[in-house]
Amino acid sequence: MAGLTPKQSTNHPNPFPQSKWRIASWILLVGYLVYSVNAMGLSWQRFTDGLGHAGTLLDRMFPPNFSRWELLLGGLVESLQIAVIASVVGILLSLFIALLAARNFMPIWISVPARAFIALCRSFHPVIIAILFVKSVGFGALAGILTLIIATIGFIAKLFAEAIEEISFKQVEAIQATGASFIKVILFSVIPQVFSRFIGFATYQFDSNLRNSTMIGIVGAGGLGGTLFSAFQRFDYDFVAAILITIIALILFWEFLSTLVRRVF
């Protein structure tokens, strides 16, 4: 720039300042990564051998075998039923629990236990929860439904509570000034402000439950996952390919539907 000496024009603060702590942190991270790779016995040889085995597996999977389409359809329908029931029940419960967990609506002695319950639902992977329910209520769809309800509450209730805490209280105060009950305040001031976000959360969770309904079936919680696991045990890899293609098609179809739902709402 005109009027500035070369020394002045280049005298800018370093946008990436270095410090001894930053350098030490990077050295520690790299050292730990190297240690972890050696401790777990990871090597390039194992990776290349795995690629060879993967090629053999793919060769046995194709062409897919859809001859047992009735078994495939039965597992698919059960997975869909598990996902729908768990999503509807879980989302309704999540809305109620989220209202209890919202700190701008509830006193601390109500919101803290509600948030603790949400955190508890989020503490374990769905497969672990599914194993517990299979041991409790036995094999089948009920264990899968209960598992996905817990997973839905853990995810959706947290997002619902955060969305409720971010609303504008001007509308709430306006509705309260009319003498409306608490239920009417929720219906006419809270829900309209967060409805579009609720729809987005709900469609995402249903997508997640569709995928999880196939996964938890591997441990006996019903659905297409049980059929998939049985096919793997029989080394029936061409039928495995048919199941995987069906799952992919189901997820893509729901992705198309969820896009339409978001456009409508």
Image: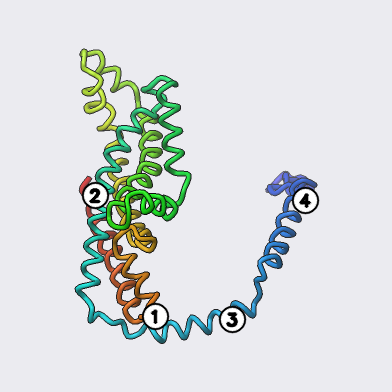
Spatial separation of the CA atoms under disc 1 and disc 3: 23 Å
First reached walking from the N terminus: tag 3 or tag 4 = 4
Q: Could you say which is closer to the camera, residue 3 or residue 138?
A: 138
Mark nearer the N terminus (2 vs 4): 4
Q: Identify which amino acid the numbered label 4 is placed on.
A: Ala
Q: Amino acid at mark 2?
A: Ile
What residue is shown with label 2? 85
Dot 1 or dot 3, earlier in sequence: 3
Q: Note whether 162 is above or below 21 in the view shown.
A: above
Residue 24: mark: 4
Taking the image as shown, residue 41 lies to the left or right of residue 174, namely right
Residue 3, position in %: x, y? 72, 44
Q: Which mark is residue 48?
A: 3
In the rendered image, residue 151, in percent from the top left (x then y), is placed at 38, 47
Calculate the distance from the C-alpha at mark 2 to the C-alpha at mark 4: 51 Å
Q: CA gap, disc 4 to disc 1? A: 50 Å
Provide the residue designation for mark 1: 235
User: How far apart in space, not on screen, are marks 3 and 4 (Cα)?
Assistant: 34 Å
